[in-house]
Image (cartoon, helix red, strand yellow):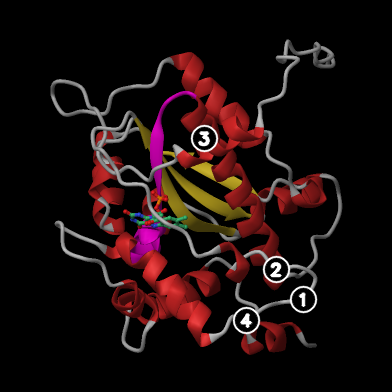
Amino acid sequence: MSLPPEPQPVDVPSRSLTPQQVTAFYDAHRTVRQYVTGPDGAPLPLPQGHLEAILHAAQRAPTDATAQLYSLVRLTRPELRARIAELTTNAHIATASEAFVVCADVRRVRRVLEVGGKTPGHWPAIAVHFGIGDAVMAGTNLLTAAEMLGYQGCWIGGVMNGLGGIIDELGLPAGVLPFAALTVGRPAEQAPYRPRVPRPLVIHTDTYHSGSDEEIREAIEVMNPIASRGGQPGDWVRLLNSYFGAGGGMEGREPKLVAALRRQGLWAGEEGVEARRP
Ligand SMILES: Cc1cc2nc3c(=O)[nH]c(=O)nc-3n(C[C@H](O)[C@H](O)[C@H](O)COP(=O)(O)O)c2cc1C
């Protein structure tokens, strides 16, 4: 078997971007949920070179322990797109130029060990920790590369709404867990610039800073516009409460995630640990 050719030096611009250019690039980021489609409403394909570049960017992400503990499932068949859109309750999966399900994946590294004549260890909590980390890094690279090419996209945590069905539809084996879907396309909406929590509550210097009630109230004021709908003033606490409050959406997702972790052999709870004891 011949070795792959040595990588050639890349013609990278010698001049770095300025801090202002970097800031402007990230300020141009918008989550976009409506995309330009073909005349028949079908997804507008990315030029092959653009698709190649964003997939390359995903695979150039750094990775824990050299292992690349993630997989992306690219959704191409219209019926599958429609089904995943339904399962995630995010219709734009059907219309985006590209749509992926981004997964933590520890199956492949186990296969490498097995094929190499070794015995894979038992580390389900580590699998979730580093698998999700690697998946996020690859997906973030992909989205950032797409934004460099003039596209916008949307992460879709809505996979949590239909985890079992998605695992079935994509034929995901043990060791593979969907984290989120990710869509990319040409924007067909003017998405607003959405605020972020003030920096002192997020970027800590040397010691963690919990924030006073006053600082938290100020953060709520800053964030309220992100919850604005139909020209009405936004209420961020109400939005967060619908997700994370008692009786909110995340409590509904919790048992589905636990069931999927068990099904995919990634459950590290008490029973998982007990099951291993001789
Ligand atoms: C992990 C993750 C999951 C998300 N899930 C959804 C989703 O299911 N549906 C959706 O429309 N947007 C989703 N979003 C997009 C967020 O709502 C969006 O990033 C946030 O409101 C900030 O807006 P911006 O990205 O335009 O600054 C998700 C984003 C992330 C990072």
Q: Which residue is mark 2?
A: 204
Which of the numbered marks, if any, corresponds to residue 210? Answer: 4
Q: Quadrant of the N terminus?
A: top right
Above or below, comparing residue 204 to residue 187 in the picture? below
Q: Mark 1 and mark 2 in contact? Answer it, CB < 8 Å.
A: yes
Distance, label 4 to label 2, CA atoms, is 9 Å
Residue 262 lies left or right of residue 59; in this view the side is: left
Please provide percent x and percent y for residue 222. Answer: 40, 65
Secondary structure under tag 2 reads loop
Q: Is residue 220 magenta?
A: no
Please provide percent x and percent y for residue 86. Answer: 24, 54
Q: Mark 3 and mark 4 in contact? Answer it, CB < 8 Å.
A: no
Which callout, 3 or 1, points at the residue further toward the start of the chain? 3
Question: Camera-side residue: 39 or 276?
Answer: 39
Which callout, 3 or 4, points at the residue further toward the start of the chain? 3
Please provide percent x and percent y for residue 55. Answer: 55, 29
Magenta span covers which residues?
149-166
Tell me the amino acid under the disc marked 1: Thr
Which of the numbered marks, if any, corresponds to residue 24? Answer: 3
Question: Camera-side residue: 54 or 34?
Answer: 34
Q: Is residue 165 magenta?
A: yes
Tell me the amino acid under the disc marked 2: His
Above or below, comparing residue 201 to residue 113 in the picture? below
Distance, label 3 to label 2, CA atoms, is 24 Å
Q: Which residue is mark 1?
A: 207
Disc 4: residue Cβ within 8 A of ligand 1's nearest atom = no
Q: Mark 1 and mark 4 in contact? Answer it, CB < 8 Å.
A: no
Which callout, 4 or 2, points at the residue further toward the start of the chain? 2
Tell me the amino acid under the disc marked 3: Ala
